Image (cartoon, rainbow, N blue to C red):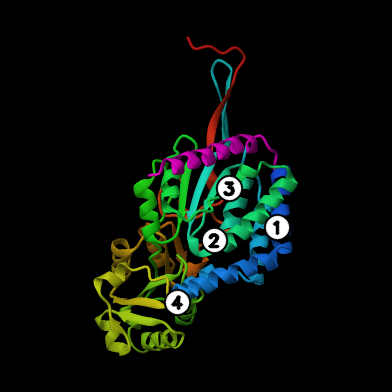
């Protein structure tokens, strides 16, 4: 690795650490003022941001990116407006920093508090979606963390435009410019240099495809909060409301197929494996979905391609769906346990005991009952946005909001207390 990469990465990380120290001393009003400035300036700079995104999309089209990936890449006015609203929602959330999680007294006059504090410096590495730039910056600022952002090369123009907007807002609010830094080189070796800055960076959150996340985990000396894949399932139970099930299935697959909470595998109880399944798959096919099915699926829907073992593990991020007919809820849960990624899985059922069995038996970060997997999202959950979705169990799980960007310290108060 080039020594200049290591030196520059260390300088960037050290500046972030210094900014984090200053942010830890700021009050809620100051940080909220910065967020309000970001929101306002996003709208003021909307045309510039959209123009930059259009250049990225044109480049992605030339590079042969899929329609779903181009959709992830694209910013238009409604999406920039949504980014601004998300920043406003984050600003409106209660400030977690300084919250006393619990407190108690001990013999000898000790008063002990467990107090919520920022993580410090957060490195966020992400692909395609330039809205992550504002979501991540806003969540980190609200929780008094400094952040280093490294977006994908395919969105470099839009990310740069959004970053310049954020920088102008920080200056206006009087916060350190290094509170939010953007890596503007596309050299992967520079990222690897950052991943070795364990003295200055506290945690890494990668967002993107499995290849990116595995590369980060393999190269990082810093703790990584991750999800490798979003292999999300919807199980249509024997006792499902079939009209509801159809709406959920179509939404989970088609509403935005290129994101990690889109359904990739449909599991259907054998009770519905005749005319209902055939009609459902026909509707999906009419929406452009390619069906890859088990033998029983292919028997009722002749346009289905036979599914391979690889299809059950696949995160397509596209209009492709694996479909399997199962004999029981237990078989559905066994399938999810074997092939799933512990991201988001759903059951459609009117039987409360079946729903409870599924909730208890499926070990995923989000388990949905009679709801689309697409609803597994920080904004939907009331978190304002998310810095990522974790399938880990430590330190955070599921959509990560501002509380997940904090840890705690013990504050112990006494009056000359000594240990004897």
Say few, some or many: other residues with alpha carbon within 10 Å of mark 1 (under 14 / 14 to 19 / 20 or more): many
Front of the two marks 3 and 1: 3
Q: Position of residue 17 (x, y in %)?
A: 56, 37
Where does residue 143 sit, x and y in percent of width and height? 61, 44
- Distance, label 3 to label 1, CA atoms, is 18 Å
In this picture, residue 341 sits left or right of residue 405? left
Q: Nearer the viewer, residue 347 or 49?
A: 49
Circles 4 and 1: CB atoms closer than 8 Å: no
Task: Give SS at disc 1.
Answer: helix
Label 3 Cα neighbours within 10 Å, binned few <14 / some 14-19 / many ≥20: many
Helix, strand or loop at label 3? It is strand
Image point (57%, 70%), residue name: 55
Residue visible at 43% across and 44% down? 193
Q: Are the residues at dot 1 and dot 2 in contact (C-beta closer than 8 Å)?
A: no
Q: Which residues are magenta?
A: 1-28
From this viewpoint, is residue 380 visible? no
Horizontal relation, residue 172 to residue 187: left or right: right
Neighbourhood count class around disc 4 (C-alpha, 10 Å): few under 14, some 14–19, many 20 upward: many
Q: CA distance from mark 4 to mark 1?
A: 34 Å
Residue furthest to the top = 420
Rendering coords of residue 404 (x, y %): 52, 47
According to the picture, the residue beneath numbered tag 1 turns out to be 39
User: Is residue 104 shown above or below 289?
Assistant: above
User: Label 2: few (<14), some or many (≥20) within 10 Å?
Assistant: many
Mark 3 or mark 2, earlier in chain: 2
Residue at label 2? 156
Occupied quadrant, residue 234 = bottom left
Report the disc number at residue 249: 4
Q: Nearer the viewer, mark 4 or mark 1?
A: 1
Quadrant (top left, top right, bottom left, bottom right) of the N terminus: top left
Give the residue number, with chain letter if any, for mark 3: 181
Q: Earlier in the sequence, mark 4 or mark 2?
A: 2
């Amino acid at each position: 690795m080039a020594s200049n990469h290591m030196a520059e990465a260390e300088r960037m990380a050290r500046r972030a650490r210094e900014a984090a120290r200053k942010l830890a001393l700021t009050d809620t009003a100051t940080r909220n003022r910065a967020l309000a400035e970001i929101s306002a300036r996003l709208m003021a700079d909307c045309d510039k941001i959209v123009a930059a995104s259009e250049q990225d999309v044109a480049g992605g089209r030339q590079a042969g990116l899929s329609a779903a990936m181009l959709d992830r890449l694209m910013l238009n006015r409604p999406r920039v407006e949504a980014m601004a609203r998300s920043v406003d929602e984050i600003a409106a959330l209660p400030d977690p920093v300084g919250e006393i999680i619990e407190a108690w007294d001990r013999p000898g006059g000790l008063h002990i508090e467990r107090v919520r504090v920022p993580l410090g410096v957060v490195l966020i590495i992400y692909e395609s979606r330039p809205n992550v730039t504002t979501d991540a910056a806003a969540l980190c600022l609200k929780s008094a963390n400094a952040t280093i952002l490294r977006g994908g090369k395919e969105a470099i123009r839009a990310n740069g435009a959004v970053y310049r907007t954020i920088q102008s807002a920080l200056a206006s609010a009087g916060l350190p410019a290094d509170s939010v830094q953007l890596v503007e080189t596309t050299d992967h070796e520079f990222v690897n240099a950052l991943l070795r800055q364990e003295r200055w960076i506290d945690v890494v959150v990668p967002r993107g495809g499995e290849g990116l996340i595995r590369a980060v985990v393999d190269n990082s000396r810093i703790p990584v909060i991750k999800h490798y894949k979003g292999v999300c399932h919807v199980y249509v139970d024997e006792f499902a409301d079939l009209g509801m099930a159809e709406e959920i299935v179509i939404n989970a697959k088609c509403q935005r197929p290129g994101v990690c909470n889109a359904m990739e595998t449909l599991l259907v109880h054998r009770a519905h494996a005749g005319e209902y399944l055939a009609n459902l798959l026909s509707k999906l096919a009419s929406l452009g979905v390619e069906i890859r099915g088990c033998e029983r699926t292919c028997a009722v829907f002749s346009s289905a391609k036979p599914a391979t073992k690889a299809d059950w593990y696949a995160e397509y991020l596209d209009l492709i769906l694996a479909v399997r007919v199962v004999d029981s809820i237990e078989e559905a849960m066994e399938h999810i346990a074997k092939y799933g990624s512990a991201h988001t899985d759903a059951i459609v059922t009117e039987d409360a005991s079946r729903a409870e069995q599924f909730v208890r038996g499926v070990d995923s970060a989000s388990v949905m009952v009679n709801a689309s997997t697409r609803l597994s999202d920080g904004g939907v959950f009331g978190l304002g946005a998310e810095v990522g979705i974790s399938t880990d169990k430590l330190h955070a799980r599921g959509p990560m909001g501002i509380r997940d960007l904090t840890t705690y310290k013990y504050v112990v108060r006494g009056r000359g207390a000594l240990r004897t």
